[in-house]
Amino acid sequence: MSGSRDAILGAIRHNHIQGEHPRPAVPLFDQAAPADLKVLFQKSLERMGGKILIPDVPDPMAPVRQAIVKPGPVVSCVPEFEGDMKITPQTKPTDIAPVEYAVLRAAFGVAETGSLCFTEKQLHVNTTGFLPQHLIVLLDPAQIVYNLHNAYQRPEWLQAHYAVFQSGPSATADIEGVLVHGAQGVRSLSVLLQP
Amino acid sequence: MTAELHEELTDPHGEQLDHGAASSRPLKSRIAEPQPRGAKIRGNRPVDQSEAANRFMAATEHEAMHDARLWDLRQKRDKEMHGIEEWEELRNLASGIKEHTLSKLDYYLELFEKNATANGIKVHWAKDGAEHNAIVLEILRSRGVERLIKSKSMLTEECGFREFMAHNHVEVIETDLGERIQQLDDEAPSHVVVPAVHKLRTDVASVFAKTIGSDPDNADAHYLTECQREATRPLILSAQAGMTGGNFVVAETGTFVVCTNEGNADLSANTPPLHIASIGIEKLIPGLNELPVFIRLLSRSALGSPITQYTSHFRGPREGGEMHVVLVDNGRSERLGMEKFWPGLKCIRCGACMNTCPVFRRSGGLSYGATYAGPIGLIIDPTFNVHKYRNLPYSSTMNGSCTNVCPVKINIHEQIADWRKTLAGDGEISPVKKVMMKAAGEVLASPVVYRASLPLGRSALRHLPHFMLYNKLNTWGRKRDIPETPKQTFNEWYRKNRKSQEKSQSEGENS
Ligand code: SF4
C-alpha cells in the first residue's frame, strides 16, 4: 500500500539518526590464503558433515557410481554422468521428491566454510538441491575460492535469481543438541573434486 | 518405527561433529519431568518474568539441561572466534555497516525496492503487524491458497501471523524442527535460533505422540526428528505457497538472504509456485561487499558453526514462479528516533546474548512473556509495549557479557541501564522495583555512574547495596548463595559454582 510506503519512509526521514556514519570499506581478508585451497576446503567440508570422494584417474565417474548404494531414482544434472531420471522443461519442483540421489556440479566452492554454490543454472529445477535424499557434487578444484569475501566477488550473484551456499547436508540439533543429518533437506552430501 | 540408538556423528578423523546447533559434547537429560510453562500473560498487565523463572528453576532437570546446552553454544562460539584473526575487525565493520545503513535507511529501502522490482519481485510495505497479515492474506486468498509452508521468522512471531492465519482458515506449517515442535505444542519459540531449547527430549516425545502419532515411549532424538520429517514432507509437497523471513537484504542487488541449517527456506521458497518473504526494514545492508561480514559472524556467534548449512540468496522469482517481499516497519522507524535505543536496530538475531546471559540460561526464554527474550528482549520489548514489559529490564545481572559477545556491538547492558532510568522517569515501575530502586540509590538509576563503574573491571553488582542484590525482594538473589566476598561478581561466583562445566575460555564474562 503506497500510503504505508510513504508513511514509513516519512517516519524514517523524520527520525533520522544523528551524526556521521560513513560506509566502511571492507577488506578481503585473504592475505593468509594458502596456494592450494583443496586441503582447507576438504577440512571445512568434513567439519560441516560433508564427505570427500576419493578420485579415480582412469575412471573419473567410478567414485560417483560407488557412492550410489541405495536403490531409487538417480537424477543427474551433469553431462559426465547418466542418471535414470531426466529433467525436462516440464519437470515440476515436486517431481524431484522421489529422487534418492542427485548428481550436480557446483558453480564454485569456498574453502573457509566448505560451502558449495548452486544456482538455478546448475540445479535445472531448484528443488534438485534439497528434495533428493542424497547429493553427490562435482567441484572443479580451480573453482575453489579462499573465503566468503572472495566468494561474494564472483559473477553468479548478479546472474542468478536463486543461489545457495550448501555447506554439508541438512542438519538439526533442535532436540537436546543431538546432531541429526537430514532434518528436511538432504541426508548426506559427497563431493568429488573433478575438473 | 522402533527405538534407535545412535552414536555421536564424527568426521573421517574421528572428531565429533558439532556443526549447526549441535552440542560439542553429549548432553542428555536423565529424567522426565513435567515441562515448566512460560510467563502468565494477563492482558496488558506487566509480565512477571521472575515468577515464571522461579518455576523454571524449580524444574531442575529442565534448568540444568537448558543451562548446559546454551553454555556449550557459548563456548563453541568462543572457539570459533579464536579461529578468526580478524574477528574484532569484523565486529567493528558489522557495527559500522549497520549504523551507516540505518542512517540512510530511506535511501537503501528505495534502492532495494527499485532493484528487486526490476528483477520481478513484488515489493509491499506494511506499517505494522496487522497490515502485514492483511497483505499476506490478500495474496494467499487471491490465489486460493489453503496451505502455506514456512521457515522460521521472528518477524512473523511479532505479527501474530500464525494465529491470524488460523482464524482465516489458512493452514500454516512450520518446517523448522524446533519451530514445528513449538507450533504443535501451541507454544511460542523460546529462543531466536533454537526455538525448543527449553524442552527435554521427553517433552518432545509427548508432543509428537499427541500430534503426529509417534511412540510416546521413544524419546530418541533421531527417531523424533525422522518422525517429523516423514510427517511434514507430504505437507510440504502439497502446499500452494511458501513463506520465509530474511536475515539480510542487499540493497544494491535487490537480493534477500536467508540462513537455515535444515534447508527450510529453500524448501519453502522453491517447492510451491508462490514465495512470500516477510522482512523487517532494519535488515538492509548496502551491497555484496558487506554481506560476507555478516555471514561470517552470524552462525559463528549464534551456534559456534562456521556457517549455516544453507545460506540462500533470492534475487527474483524462478521461471513460472511468483515472489513477494513484504517490508515491515512495526515500530522500527519510531525506534530510529530514540536517541539511546536506536542501536538495538543493528541486531542480527544471532542469540549470542541469550546464550551467554546467566538469567536467560536459568530461566528459559518463555519466562519473558514476549516475542524477544534475553538481553536483546530487555531492550526492544519495551519499545513494543512499555507498560507490559516495564519489568523486563530488571531481569539482568548487568555483567556486560551480552555486550561483549554481540557481533554488531550493541551496547546492550548500557541500554538496559538506560531503560531502567527511562522507566523510572516515566513512572512505569512496579512497587517491588520501586523499593529496590530506592535502595539502590543512584547507581542503577544513573547510567553515568553505572558506566563509570565498568572500567574497574567488575560488574556493577559490586557497587549495588547488598540489600538490593540478596534481599528476598530481588528475585535474582533468590535461590543463590551469597558470595563470600562482595568483591566477587555474581558471574565469577556463578562460574566457580558450575560443577559440570569446564572453565570458561571466554573473553566475555568479566572483561
Ligand atoms: S543483540 Fe547482538 S548478540 Fe543479541 S541477538 Fe542481537 S546481534 Fe545477537
Image: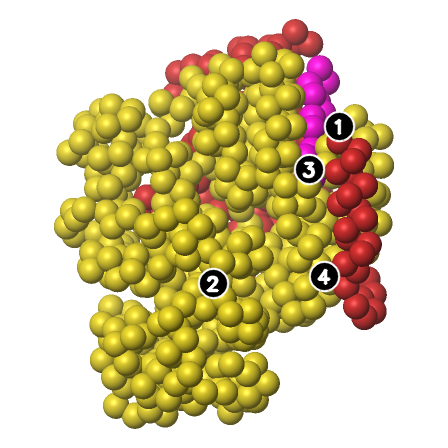
Tell me the mark number nearer the camera, choosing from 3 and 2: 2
**Chain for mark 2?**
B
Q: Is B277 or B263 nearer to us in this picture?
A: B277
Q: Earlier in the sequence, mark 3 or mark 2?
A: 3
Q: Give the yellow chain's letter.
A: B
Disc 3 to disc 4, C-alpha distance: 19 Å
Q: Give the residue displayed 45% in from the left and 77% down from the top.
A: B399
Report the residue marked by disc 1.
B122
Q: In the rendered structure, which amino acid carries the disc numbered 4?
A: Gly
Q: Tell me whether circle 1 and circle 2 mark residues in contact (CB < 8 Å).
A: no
Q: Give the residue displayed 29% in from the left and 81% down from the top.
A: B470
Tell me the mark number nearer the camera, choosing from 3 and 1: 3
Quadrant occupied by the N terminus of chain B:
top left
Q: In the rendered structure, which amino acid carries the disc numbered 2?
A: Arg
Q: Is residue B320 magenta?
A: yes
Q: Is residue B442 magenta?
A: no
Which disc number belongs to residue B337? Answer: 4
Q: In the rendered structure, which amino acid carries the disc numbered 1?
A: Lys
